[in-house]
Amino acid sequence: SGKGEFYRFFFFKQKTAYEMLRSLVGSEMCIRDRIIDIYSLLGQLCLLMEDKEKSLEYYIKGREIAEKNLRGAETMKLAKILFNEASALNSLENYQLAWDQLNRAFNIKEKLSSNDDELEGNMRILQGNIYINWHHDIEKSDSFIQQGLSAFQRINQDNYYCDEIKTKLHEIAQIYEGAQETDQACIYYGKCLKVVQKLQEDESEGGDGDEVSQEDQQFLSLLLEDYGNILIELCLLYTSDAADDLLCVDLGGRRIIKKK
């Protein structure tokens, strides 16, 4: 009977070891997933702190870990970190590599037939951002950006007047302003202001009165400041252009008084 007990004990230990091994592998996968997320968050934090090189370094580390993982569920994680890496590369003016990494993300998303409209929208806007900085082609860049805005509309049941569109219009205006496309930036600041006004009207009609949240007030203040600055820049630009066409004024638009 002692021998029988030994076999029962042996088989019991073997099964437990197998279960423990499976549990350990699962834990390792979970830890690896967390590490990828941590690298992504560190990359975003560094980008906010304007440490672009460090941000790119973290994104690359996360991407290298994700690339070694062959599980299907991880593939969209790879697409997202490729998008982040492309964004960092764009900020460092490495447009060719940014474009290549973004295309890799698009290919993964298409292969998986993913319906992630938020990622699609952000990727299309980044595509327009890279293109305007790289090629200075407003028409082509704006076609990418419009696709991005359409994706965000789908998230909101084809509603153009929503917080997501408001935020993205402001972001797009800043993209064009950063690319020194002042006219285009002005157009998008104006579009953003119209969305803000419509949202405030809808809130008033909904019975919320004239109360506006502190977050909305801060956004409106920032928007008006940015919009005002770009309008001033446009006025100075056109004044300077007009001055170039006249002999009686200098480049700043000031009249030159000629002494005889």
Image (spheres, rainbow, N blue to C red):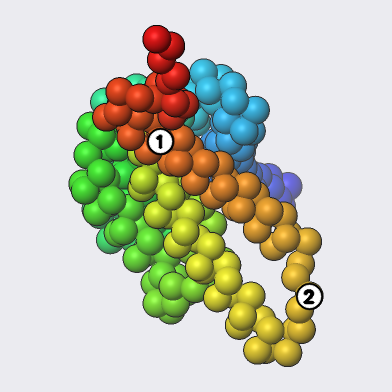
Disc 2 target residue: 211
With respect to residue 71, does 214 lie above or below? below
Q: Quadrant of the C terminus?
A: top left
Q: How many numbered markers are drawn?
A: 2
Residue at 56%, 42% in the rendered image: 229
Q: Could you say which quadrant of the image residue 17 lies in?
A: top right
Residue at 55%, 75% in the rendered image: 198
The answer to whether residue 119 of the structure is visible from this angle is: no
Disc 1 target residue: 239
Residue at 41%, 15% in the rendered image: 258
Disc 1 marks a residue whose amino acid type is: Thr
Q: Secondary structure at mark 2?
A: loop
Disc 2 marks a residue whose amino acid type is: Glu
What is the x, y in percent for residue 153? Answer: 41, 70
Point out the frontmost of discs 2 and 1.
Answer: 1
Side of 144 relative to 159 (left or right) = left
What is the x, y in percent for residue 214? Answer: 78, 61
Residue 4 badge:
none
Q: CA distance from mark 2 to mark 1?
A: 40 Å
Q: Foreground residue, 20 or 44?
A: 44
What is the x, y in percent for residue 134? Answer: 27, 29
